[in-house]
Every structure is written in C-alpha cells, then in structure tokens.
Amino acid sequence: MTEQRIDQPVVVTGANGLVGSHVCAALAERGVAVRAVVRRSGTAPALDGVTEVVGEFTDPAQAPGLVEGAAALVTTVHPMGTDRATQEQVGVEGTTTIATAAREAGVGLLVHVSTASVYDRRAGVGDVDESADPVPDDAGDYPVTKRDTDARLEVLDGPTRVLVRPPVILGPGESSLWNTLRPRAMAEDPAEAHATPDLTFAWVHVTDLARLVGDVVTGAVPIGEDPEAGPVAGEVTAVNAAAGASTFRHYLETVTTALGVEPTWDDGPAWQGRVVSERARAWGWQPQVSLEQAFRELVEDLPEVVPGAVSGTSRS
C-alpha cells in the first residue's frame, strides 16, 4: 500500500484514551503531524510529531478552532459506562459538533471509531457484516447511542466519512475495559466474574485497530467509488475491524485463572455468529496480533493491574 504525504495535521479526539493514544502513535510513526485533543493538560502521548491541544471538542465555540487547517479528523471518544444522558451529550452530540465543525472548515476526511455493538447480535441472528441490521431501541445505552452517533455522521453531507467498527478491543492501558477494568472488577468482587460461556467473543487488538485507522487516514487505503476497495469519496463507508472470534468462556477462564477466582456461568441464549471483516481485508488490512498473543499480554500485565495476580498463567 502506498501512503500519501500529508502536509496538514490530523486531529485526534480522546488522544489520551486507549484507542486515541494508539492512533496518535500509528500516525506519528508514519510521519504525520498529529493534533492531539485532550481535556487535561499533560495527558496526550509524548511523541515526536504529536502536539497536545487542551480543549472541549463538544463545545460549539471551541470545536472550530480544534479542526482549523486539518487534513483529517479522527474521533475516538464515547463515555462507555456513564449514564444515558452523558453518552448522548458527549458521544452523540459532541461527536456531531466537532464533525460539523470539521465539515465547515473544509476537512475532507472524517474517521469515526464506532463499534460492532451497533449491529443486532441477538441469539440466532448469525454473522454480521456492514449491511447487517442495527440494534433496536431497547438494546442498551451504549449500543443505541453509538448507533445514533453513526446515524448522525451518515447524514453529514460533504466529507468522506469512514465508520470503523471494532468488536472487543484488547490491549494494555489504564482505560482498557478488557485488560484492566473488568479484571480489576473481578478481583475486587468475584461476583463480577460471570458470562454466558458460548457467547461469541469477537475481538481485535488495539494496535491492529490503530493501524487500520492509520491506513485510511494516510491514503494507504485509496478513496474511490467502490466500498469493497476503500472509502467512497464524499459518502459514508462502514468497515468492520475484527481479527477473529472465540468465546467468553475462553476470556473469562483466562482472567479468572490468573486472578485465582472461580467464574460463574450464566444461562440463556447467546449470539454465536462472526463479525465479518472481509471488507477490511479487501482494503489490505491484515491483523498481526493473534488471540494467543493478546491473552498472553493480558495475563503478563495483570500483576500491575491487580496485585497478587499470577503472571504468565492462562488457558488457551
């Protein structure tokens, strides 16, 4: 894949988060100047080519200044785990605010890190690709507000818009749900160590996800007219970013073995399909981190996340 030279900065919101920080790193490695938007000073990645900008991208008065003169905008922020009103304010309205400001500023490319949770994945649905049905209104706060954010960007005419949809994102980091927050919750309260064992665990490692975003931003994936070859110019194109699939039994047993707690298995119907990522692979994306590597990394880092965890112990 051939990258294009980008003379203007690329704006990344949530640059101090798990995904945002890796996107900054992926772009900086390619020589792209990054304008890293954060809310707190001193929290952006300290990398050559990355300039921290403290601001509220959700504020209509500040958003235009954050995107002025940018080549592209990458949005990564959604306050998962907060109440519905906060997710709507920050995720839906805030993302719409800065995306609209980018359009008005003449930014030609918007890349939004969405989620595969926007697809209806109830038991019996089967595999989901980019044409799959969205979640219904009763699916829960996170899937519905992410769905609604995507819908806002779909009607934002003008720029080329790419909706990158990962499933579970693995990788170390203080804000990592699957490597840090959930294991810590299980250690503090073993009752949190429960799951439906046969539920599909579709996953991607954060470095592979960031690499796909980097490919899109730098033009290594060319913009054209066929969504199976790359983003469609001036339109919205969704692309799934799943490296593979396992089961929640595999994930939960890996973590609980290292923590020394017993898992609890929930009964009930479970989705057992795949998040189909043939489109991303047709764009030239090939995940490099295997599930075995990702789980090994998770377990090796657990003693830092949860003192007393057994490093190097996993079930594969």
Image (cartoon, grey):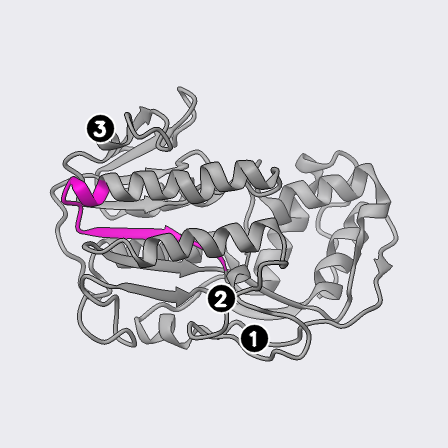
- Where's the C terminus, which quadrant? bottom right
Q: How many marks?
A: 3
Which corner quadrant of the image does residue 10 belong to? top left
Amino acid on which disc 3 is placed: Gly
- Whichever of callouts 2 and 3 sits on the residue coming sooner in the sequence is 3
Q: Is residue 73 magenta?
A: no
Is 290 placed above or below 15 here?
Answer: below
- Whichever of callouts 1 and 2 sits on the residue coming sooner in the sequence is 2
The residue that label 3 is drawn on is 65
Q: Is residue 107 magenta?
A: yes
The residue that label 2 is drawn on is 242
Query: Element at badge 3?
Result: helix
Amino acid on which disc 1 is placed: Arg
Amino acid on which disc 2 is placed: Ala
**Residue drawn at the location 74% of the way across and 52% of the way down:** 255
Query: Element at badge 2?
Result: loop
- Where's the N terminus, which quadrant? bottom left
